[in-house]
Amino acid sequence: MTAMNVVGFDGCHHDKSVLKEILFGAKSKLDECGGVLVGGHTIETPEMLYGLSVTGIIHPNKIYKNSTARVGDVIVLTKPLGLGVLTTALKADMIDKNLIKYITSLLAQLNYKASKIIKDFDVSACTDVTGFGFLGHLHEMVRDDISFIVQKDEVPIIEGALDMADMGIIPTGTYNNKSYLNDKVNFLSEDEKDILLFDAQTSGGLLISVSQKDANKLVNVLKESGYERSSIIAEVVPRNEYPITIR
């Protein structure tokens, strides 16, 4: 419903026109999802930061939880992985302009439209992928009576992320995620892609638990709506030895 800017700006090294662009970009995203900017706070900081403090309302009977996936459902992921690795590489000036443009478009893509789309499908649970990474947030969807089987080859990865990871350009948060989940995830085979399943994402996509009969239709509508890398990446099964198994 409403939002307030929270800004730290380095006025010593950047012209105020940069601040104007930051605020303009954020306002365009607020307009996109129907929010109203009501003010904010701006301070001088050596490292620039930007965020929003938001308020909203939701119908109590129309809440998607992360803990209500059904056995027999499949899991759809709406954005590719690798944003944590690539934003780390971006800060080190290690990626080219074309890749910068692509990851910026992913970072700026809201989950708002996807959250509206899923209302027309048989969806039982939903969550987003952020700092705990793909596997961390998938693990949050686990219950005592369910497990997840992930098809690793179906998980979309941003081109270039694996190259950066192979060079050791990996955020600390990604290593922390891996350490926490080591005994909760069973890899049937291991390869260099595995680290990206733990990658701490910034502005990642949604994980959607949807009935198998609706899954392909949902993916097609998501792709038509701009979530071009949407993919069915896992299935919900009765609880087995591990919360998550990677095939």
Image (cartoon, rainbow, N blue to C red):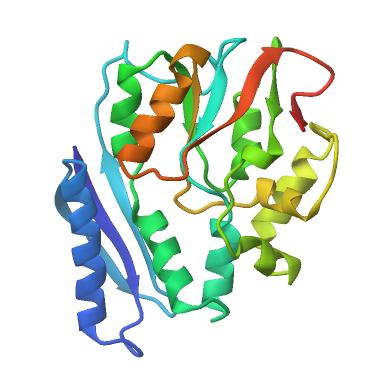
Above-or-below relation of 65 to 88: above
List x then y, in percent, for residue 45.
39, 76
Above-or-below relation of 124 to 111: above
The image quarter in which residue 14 lies: bottom left
75 relative to 236 in the view: left or right = left
Above-or-below relation of 169 to 28: below
115 relative to 210 in the view: left or right = left
Q: Quadrant of the N terminus?
A: top left
Residue 15 at least partly seen? yes
Q: Nearer the viewer, residue 11 or 147?
A: 147
List x then y, in percent, for residue 66.
51, 23
List x then y, in percent, for residue 197.
67, 46
201 relative to 237 in the view: left or right = left
Which residue is at a point 26% across and 69% down the rendered structure image? 22
168 relative to 9 in the view: left or right = right
Q: Nearer the viewer, residue 204 or 62?
A: 204
Which residue is at a point 28% across and 28% down the rendered structure image? 116
Q: Quadrant of the C terminus?
A: top right
Above-or-below relation of 147 to 30: above
The image quarter in which residue 74 lies: top right
Which residue is at a point 18% across and 65% down the rendered structure image? 24
Residue 143 at least partly seen? no
Q: Nearer the viewer, residue 79 or 68?
A: 79
Which residue is at a point 69% across and 14% down the rendered structure image? 237
Extreme-bottom residue of the structure = 13
Figure label count: 0
List x then y, in percent, for residue 140.
61, 28
